[in-house]
Image (tube, rainbow, N blue to C red):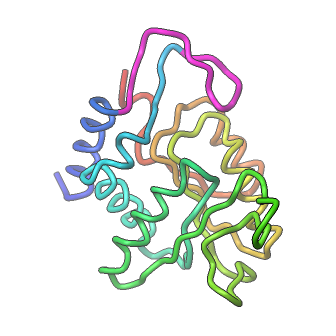
Amino acid sequence: MNAAEIARKRLIEIVRERSFSTGSETKLASGRSSAFYFNMKPTMLDPEGANLIATLILERLKGSAAELVGGLEMGAVPLAVATAVLSHTGPRPLRAFFVRKQAKEHGARKLVEGLGPGEDLNGKRVVILEDVTTTGGSSLKAIEAVRADGGIVDQVITVVDRLEGAQDAFKTAGVAFSALLTAADFR
């Protein structure tokens, strides 16, 4: 077993322990209901969980021309930060950003946050991150905002794909998609 396979196996254990539940019907961000639920925040905010996720994301990005990682608030924020921090120790540091669901009514009033003065996404290669993907709606909102700012969306990487249609939605949007884990890992 190689290092990535070991990290993935351990991540499944942490998600099962900290972020996965079954039994009662839960309403998802997509509007659908499900008898199983992933609340990824306990895993994403766990030191080992965050490190494993960032390690596996960076493994997926080997050979990629990506310059930034980010996605829709709230789920993508800890993912982007952990990935950016860990990337600093590697051959190619990646900066992080996030997309607000709605621009603030004060301050800079931007949808895309985390860029320094004079920085923008124009012409930059971006990877969209997501904690849990059902239909892809959250990432599609982030893709729209990134493209509106001139960014080039390289791909979407999710921690867990619920296997409920996201792959087709990203194919239609012309964006590559991959998942570190899927719902099948928890059955």
Q: Indicate whether residue 69 is drawn in magenta.
A: no
Q: Quadrant of the C terminus?
A: top left
Vertical position of residue 134 compared to residue 4: above or below: above
Q: Main secondary structure of the magenta part?
A: strand
Question: Residue most toward the left?
Answer: 1
Q: How many marks?
A: 0
Q: Residue at x 31, y 33 (%)?
A: 18
Vertical position of residue 47 compared to residue 59: above or below: above
- Give left or right: position of 135 versus 22: right
**Is 2 in front, or is 103?**
103
Vertical position of residue 25 compared to residue 69: above or below: above
Question: Residue most toward the top?
Answer: 24
Across and down, in percent, residue 90 comes to 32, 80
Across and down, in percent, residue 155 comes to 60, 61
**Is 17 in front, or is 157?**
17
Q: Indicate whether residue 23 is drawn in magenta.
A: yes
Write down the region rendered in magenta: 19-34
Q: Residue at x 27, y 38 (%)?
A: 14
Q: Residue at x 45, y 65 (%)?
A: 81
Question: Residue most toward the front?
Answer: 106
Q: Residue at x 46, y 57 (%)?
A: 79
Across and down, in percent, residue 30 comes to 69, 31
Across and down, in percent, residue 26 comes to 56, 17
- Give left or right: position of 151 versus 18: right
Question: Residue most toward the bottom?
Answer: 118
**Is 3 in front, or is 128?**
128
Q: Where, by quadrant of the figure, is residue 16 drawn?
A: top left
Q: Where, by quadrant of the figure, is residue 138 drawn?
A: top right
